[in-house]
């Protein structure tokens, strides 16, 4: 007799401290590819910043130029006391063209399962042709797009619930 599949254990409350060492090892880039910064704030359903979330970024086009990383294309960061997060992402030569700058996984207190999202760069001229964005209702696409604030700098907030909830994907 096989055991039925059950939901994940609720994330936290201790992961923020337990994973801090990993965050320090994976938030900066040593790459020959162009580098950008995506930063923002993660909010709960009441609009309060989440100060103990863990976020992972997976770069879809990671290559050997990130030789300083044990896992090229992987980043992890903890949100700070104000819910802030920051990822340095390297973009290989084939990056973008309507594809995400990174796939994002969110771990936070109260979640039964981690959540999956993606961040696109607002100045990517191919967003209208994005195979992923075109699967998302037009009125919700903006929740996946980081706004350019300066050269190589982008701002993207994550809303876990509510009227402006970030789009999360179900890969099951």
Image: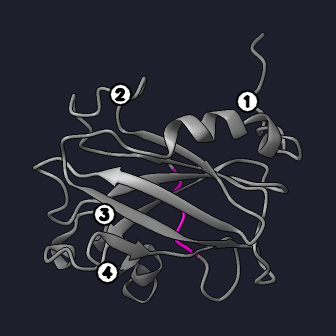
Farthest residue in the top direction? 1
Q: How many marks?
A: 4
Precedes in sequence: disc 4 or disc 1: 1
- Mark 2–mark 1 distance (CA, rounded to whole Å): 37 Å
Precedes in sequence: disc 3 or disc 2: 2
Name the residue beneath numbered marker 1. 5
Over which residues does the magenta segment extend?
166-170
Evaluate if marks 4 and 3 touch, with contact meaning CB atoms under 8 Å apart. Answer: no
Label number found at residue 121: none
Q: Relative to 172, is 136 above or below?
A: below
Q: Nearer the viewer, residue 86 or 73?
A: 86
Is residue 41 magenta-colored?
no
Q: Please indicate, yes or no, whether residue 172 appears anywhere in the rendered image.
A: no
Precedes in sequence: disc 3 or disc 1: 1
Evaluate if marks 2 and 1 touch, with contact meaning CB atoms under 8 Å apart. Answer: no
Crowd band around label 2 with a 10 angstrom C-alpha radius: few (<14), some (14–19), many (20+): few
Nearer mark to the viewer, of 3 and 2: 2
- Mark 3–mark 1 distance (CA, rounded to whole Å): 28 Å
At x 60%, y 40%, the residue is 24
Nearer mark to the viewer, of 3 and 1: 3
Q: Where is residue 77 drawn, in percent x and y?
A: 60, 49
Q: Where is residue 166 drawn, in percent x and y?
A: 56, 74
Q: Which secondary structure, mark 1?
A: loop
Label number found at residue 68: 2
Q: Relative to 44, is 87 above or below?
A: above
Left or right: residue 90 compared with residue 76: left
Name the residue beneath numbered marker 3. 132
Q: Nearer the viewer, residue 118 or 135?
A: 118
At x 55%, y 34%, the residue is 25
Crowd band around label 3 with a 10 angstrom C-alpha radius: few (<14), some (14–19), many (20+): few
**The image quarter in which residue 96 lies:** bottom left
């Amino acid at each position: 007799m096989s055991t039925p599949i059950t939901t994940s254990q609720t994330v936290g409350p201790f992961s923020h401290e337990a994973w801090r060492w990993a965050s320090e090892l994976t938030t900066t880039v040593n790459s020959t590819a162009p580098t950008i910064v995506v930063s923002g704030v993660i909010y709960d359903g009441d609009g309060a910043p989440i100060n103990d979330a863990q976020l992972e970024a997976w770069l879809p086009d990671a290559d050997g130029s990130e030789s300083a990383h044990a896992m090229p294309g992987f980043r992890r960061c903890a949100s700070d006391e104000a819910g802030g997060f920051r990822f340095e992402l390297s973009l290989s030569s084939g990056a973008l063209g309507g594809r995400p700058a990174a796939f994002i996984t969110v771990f936070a207190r109260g979640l039964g399962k981690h959540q999956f999202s993606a961040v696109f760069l607002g100045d990517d001229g191919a967003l209208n042709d994005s195979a992923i964005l075109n699967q998302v209702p037009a009125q919700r696409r903006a929740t996946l797009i980081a706004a350019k604030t300066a050269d190589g700098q982008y701002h993207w907030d994550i809303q876990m619930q509510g009227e402006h909830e970030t789009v999360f994907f179900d890969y099951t």
